[in-house]
Image (cartoon, coloured by chain):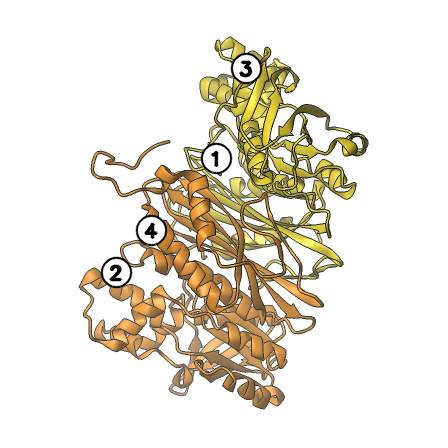
Chain colours: A yellow, B orange
Amino acid sequence: MPGSAGAATPATPTVADLGEHGLIARLRARVPPPPAWLAVGIGDDAAVVEPPRNQLEVLTTDVLVEGVHFDRRFSTAADIGHKALAVNLSDLAAMGAEPRSALLSLALPAALAVAEFDALLDGFLALAARHRLALVGGNLAQSPGPLVVDVTAVGAVRRRRALTRAGGRPEDELFLSGRIGGAAAGLARLQALGAALAAGDPEAEETVRRYRRPDPRVRLGLVVARNRAASACVDLSDGLADAVRQLAAASGTGAELDAGEIPVEPGARAWSERQGRDALADAVAGGEDYELLFAVPRRRRRAFLAAARLVKDTTVTRIGRLTPPGAVVLARDGRTAPLPAGFAHFGLGG
Amino acid sequence: MPGSAGAATPATPTVADLGEHGLIARLRARVPPPPAWLAVGIGDDAAVVEPPRNQLEVLTTDVLVEGVHFDRRFSTAADIGHKALAVNLSDLAAMGAEPRSALLSLALPAALAVAEFDALLDGFLALAARHRLALVGGNLAQSPGPLVVDVTAVGAVRRRRALTRAGGRPEDELFLSGRIGGAAAGLARLQALGAALAAGDPEAEETVRRYRRPDPRVRLGLVVARNRAASACVDLSDGLADAVRQLAAASGTGAELDAGEIPVEPGARAWSERQGRDALADAVAGGEDYELLFAVPRRRRRAFLAAARLVKDTTVTRIGRLTPPGAVVLARDGRTAPLPAGFAHFGLGG
């Protein structure tokens, strides 16, 4: 088994030193006791689960690739483990599903320190515990280059309650959770300032936190779906502009956003203005906010707002409406213009 | 959006030229009509499925990483697509599960030709069709280096029918499907001879085919599980030596293999002998055969053989037995010796 490069120094143990069986043993030691519905867990050829009773299942997969989706100078291993699960939970949230289980597939550089492997798992498992999601299986392989973290998440949703992108109708109102632009501004700050980030500026720190540790809106998606309070939903993995386009295209509508209503993260606004840039355009185009965008029929507005109030730590804001089939536009200062292009990870999305 | 390297030449279109939405459209055009149990398929935030009724679900994930699990000089894109699904189907087979759905997550080098992307999908989808498995979702991202193909497969198994590694008891007989050593010999041939492989030697060609296009023993696992004809099962992803150790460890037993009974692929034997090597040792240590190893209680031997006969294209061979807790040994010429070490992908497994 190959040792780490530079093994002559008093070596930090690497994942290659430990090997697959050693790493699986470490992983099993960190995973909490299995739920009753897990018949066979980590360590066999596959996991065996009792499916949710009288519910549909929701399946999603999303990968984080080093150099594309994260940079180990800007995110700790625990941040990466957190985010790899968060982006999948955000997809479950956008369907109105309750998280249940996940599989974790890691391609690890041989020289990765075992402590980093542990921290990645800890970041993943801490977020899993908050959402009562069980890690039921996975896969460990070596990578000749980047660290690759691929997660499959499985959730449950009641019949006829799943939120898709396709149910919106003209005149439905568009509601957005939270505020946007934070993650993109946080990444831009890290790229510009690196470790020299000024501490003690809470708004700036919040943008970096939003980039490193997105908070998927699982409970909001769930209560909105349970109350049939929205006609369509999508998450903002690739930014608001992309999300609105996806929802409108799937629903066969146009859309109009009101520039003055779009809630921009204060630390994102400050960063854009400091660069002499248009804060709203940056926020609308910026990716990785992992907020939810809902289409809400007008007669369901009251039900929607009541459902959203059940979720203590999230606000919702009406930012526009779906329109008859046609363009997706931004209304600003009495004029409308096409929305700026969305965000993409090196042109291929993620 | 970045073009391919060398874009001045009359360029072959690359995945970066097409972008995520273009690739997803290509993917959707290739996927056959969805089964009735698929409520929401490719193109939303997640897939929504009706779970199997009165059955348990089996979930597995396995990744192929370029430079670790495959080499694009030795395998076509279609081979890679086939194999990425095959290794997951083999895990379902080892649990006795019937394949149902899969998610496909690809991290693609920007310069990958669109034709290669198409071929990878075609290889995946052709094998999926043979096993009546539906591709229900996935993810496309860019890779800064290796091509990474991560698959999650979901199957169904009746209650109390799942085959685990842990059910074996001392005196159970060990049965192996097919023949071993082929895939490792095929890879060794490719590494030694590359494109200069002698055509017209069917035994040699069969080893290369076994390496490139493993044939998961899905139907065998299924009929054995349905007939409760085995007490334990594991697949040979990392070779026979590793599989026997895994099954014995999980079952709390030892094991003894009879060297004279182990069926070695003829083209693997020829290759080892040509190198002056011990063909049996090579075959036992070699990985990627994706055969199944079963533990069969003696009173179930007849039922096991009857079940196996239902599967036309696979033989099974008795190769040894489980023993009281202790070592895992190979009996050869009247003596026993410890089994050689198993196979591992660069020391980390896969």
Mark earlier in primary sequence (1, 3): 1
The kind of residue tagged 1 is His
From the image, state whether disc 1 or disc 3 is nearer to you: 3
Q: Quadrant of the N terminus of chain A?
A: bottom left
- For the residues labelled 2 and 1, say whether their Cβ atoms are less than 8 Å apart: no
Which residue is disc 2 drawn over?
B191
Residue name at image x 27 percent, y 55 percent: B73
Displayed quadrant of residue A271: top right
| Marked residue chain, label 2 | B
Residue located beneath label 4 in the image:
B116
Query: Which amino acid lies under the numbered mark 2 shown in the image of this protein?
Result: Gln
A261, A20: nearer the viewer: A261
Subunit of label 1? A
Q: CA distance from mark 2 to mark 4?
A: 22 Å
Q: Residue at x 23, y 36 (%)?
A: B6
User: In the image as oriented, which residue stretches furthest toward the front?
Assistant: A324
Is A154 in front, or is B126? B126
* Residue A69 marker: 1
The answer for how far apart the CA atoms under marks 2 and 3 are is 55 Å
Q: Are marks 2 and 4 in contact (CB under 8 Å)?
A: no
